[in-house]
Amino acid sequence: MAGNTRLDLSGAAICGDSMERDPPICLPNQASNASLASLDIGGTLIKLVYFENGKLNFVKFETSRLEECLDFIQDKKLLNGRPPGVSTANRVMKATGGGAFKFADVFKEKLGVSLDKLDEMDSVVAGANFLLKKIPGESFTHMSRKRMPVHVNQDNLFPYLLVNIGSGVSMIKVTGTKKFERVTGTHIGGGTIFGLAKLLTGCRKYDEFLKLSQQGDNLVLDLIVKDICGELACQKQGLSASTLASSFGKVISSQRKLTDYKAEDLATTLLSAFTYNIAQVSFLVASLLGLNRVYFGGSYIRGHASIMDNISYAIDYWSKGQMQAVFLRHEGFLGALGAFMSYESLNINGLILNDLKEQESSHKDSTPIDAKFTSDLNDSNIFPYLLVNIGSGVSLIEVIGKGKFERIIGTHLGGGTILGLARLLTGCTSYDEFLELSQRGNNLSVDLTVGDIYGGHGYLKHGLPASTTASSFGKVSSNKLSDYKIEDLAAALLNAFTYNIGQISYFVSKLSGLKRIFFRGSYICGHAKTMDKISRSLKYWSKDQIQTTFLCHEGFMGTLGAFWSYENMGINDVAAHEFMKEVLLSAPYMGGKSQSSPQEHFHGKDDETNLRGEIESLKHSNAELRAEVERLEQEKSELKARLEKLQLIISSQNR
């Protein structure tokens, strides 16, 4: 398996059907008697690359069915061809991924082979560079169901951003042959999509979920701009009626339960929600790094047309056509290919994979945030700042002065998404009930951590402690919702989306050069755990360089802005029509059937009781709002009186 076995990749090219998924790669000059194989063992899938009959072949197995992989290796006799002088007891197979550590003893016991464990990021980058530099026709774009090949200019390949979509998502800046840096990642990845898909649709396999997603209509559950302000208002304000405002946002105003929705509609909504989010984070990271080339890989893409279309459309939308999403034919085998390259130090440009030593970035303890920012905010030091409005969706607004602001971007994964999914998964009927549930739950029962993948030491080479969330809902193994506590599901939901909002807020503030962020919106609700998670997220991403502030009347900002506009007190631009723009999300929209949202019909005693309860709740909220307005009016009168008194004093001193 190892030793002096020589790899010859000259003349490597894709062979077979040009449209085949994971097609073989011909190695015309490689000795046919060589027996070579490599593995990438992930949390969900095992990827195997092996050489046979002049070709590199690619095959996948579910990690939960490890025995099938072991049987395949034996049946194919991939361990038989060993170099001279290498005994059966010393056979070695190259492997990467967290499972290379987790299952090393199993391979030794069952197959008598030792796994030579290689760093995962090193392998992924080496695999990507091999494909981009040596395999013609490997890369392509995919828009509106059309695949177009991309010619890679070898003299202008670097730098590029590699987005690897596994259970979580890693984003790697590749600047050369052995030069790369994992710049960031997101815990909302393929494991999140599939984990929630199991719970919401009952599907058992990822491919089954993908098939369901092709048959559904996300407009049954998604809230779009037209649903909020109507077609006419959209035209008047210059807003696209089909803009996605809040994924799963329609659920919160519906009386329907999980069983009332079609599995196909749920699958389509899940797929669009999270592929758009991955694309948005990728766009923000690429913008921060000044990169226009973004390559997407990872086993969760699966060559699926809707996934690639969603990512491509979103990248094009947010970048205004300045960036392009590019995909790879062998997207799920980057790590396994990189491991395969390591059988021999190759004297070929850019394909050497030895023990790459990444320089760890050291972060000194930062000065306490209070020492960096003044706590007394006034007209002279408050501007500029980033205002993050968390409604059904999330809007991010740069405020540079009184009445001077610009909505920069937003995300469709907001409060409406959290509560919508919470209603489906836990059956809670209010946001307060959901928050109360989340306080009693443990997200680690469903969330996959770095420690679950790499063990108790974590992945320290790239700065990821064992406690880091690798994939929200990535630990979900059962497709029975009843197997999980609703408190744990609520805790995982809150964890997933608050950290996502915090991450996106940090990237936007960084791009805009802003070091102060104000959070507001009815979905914060002064809830300590919500604010704590957002604060922790900003602290982590910014390394204490961003000040996070929560507003006391976060749920009444729009009403207060309208109130103060009566007196033209500097913020009159936050009037009704501008506020409507502020709370909406400019996320792209694709797919679905343009149909009106289901009308609500109330029948029976229980429904009438619910309706009366909602009316009483609205009356109570209205009374609270009136009391707040009265207090503000009193405060305004007092301020005016003090101002008049001050003017009299100044006037008397000038005489």
Image: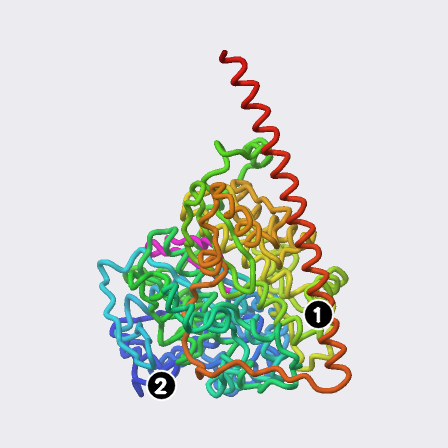
In the picture as drawn, the residue positioned furthest to the top comes out as 655
- What span is in magenta? 169-185
- The mark found on residue 435 in the picture is none
Q: Where is residue 120 in the image (x, y as percent from the top left)?
A: 49, 62
| In front of the other: 447 or 284 | 284
Q: What residue type is labelled 1?
A: Ile
Q: Where is residue 580 in the image (x, y as percent from the top left)?
A: 48, 60
Q: What element carries label 1?
A: helix
Q: Where is residue 619 in the image (x, y as percent from the top left)?
A: 71, 63
Q: Mark 2 points at which residue?
A: 20
Q: Quadrant of residue 475?
A: bottom right
Q: In which quarter of the image is residue 351?
A: bottom left
CA neighbours of label 1 inside 10 A, class few (<14), some (14 to 19), many (20+): few
Question: In the figure, 112 relative to 392: above or below?
Answer: below
N-terminal of the two: label 2 or label 1? 2
CA–CA distance between discs 2 and 1? 58 Å
Residue 60 visible here: yes
On the picture, is 14 further left or further right than 65? left
| In front of the other: 644 or 608 | 644
Q: Where is residue 274 in the image (x, y as percent from the top left)?
A: 50, 70
Q: What element carries label 2?
A: loop
CA neighbours of label 2 inside 10 A, class few (<14), some (14 to 19), many (20+): few
Q: Name the residue under label 1.
A: 615
Residue drawn at 61 percent across, 31 percent down = 641
Q: Main secondary structure of the magenta part?
A: strand
Numbered marks: total: 2
Q: Does the magenta-highlighted stretch encompass residue 475?
A: no
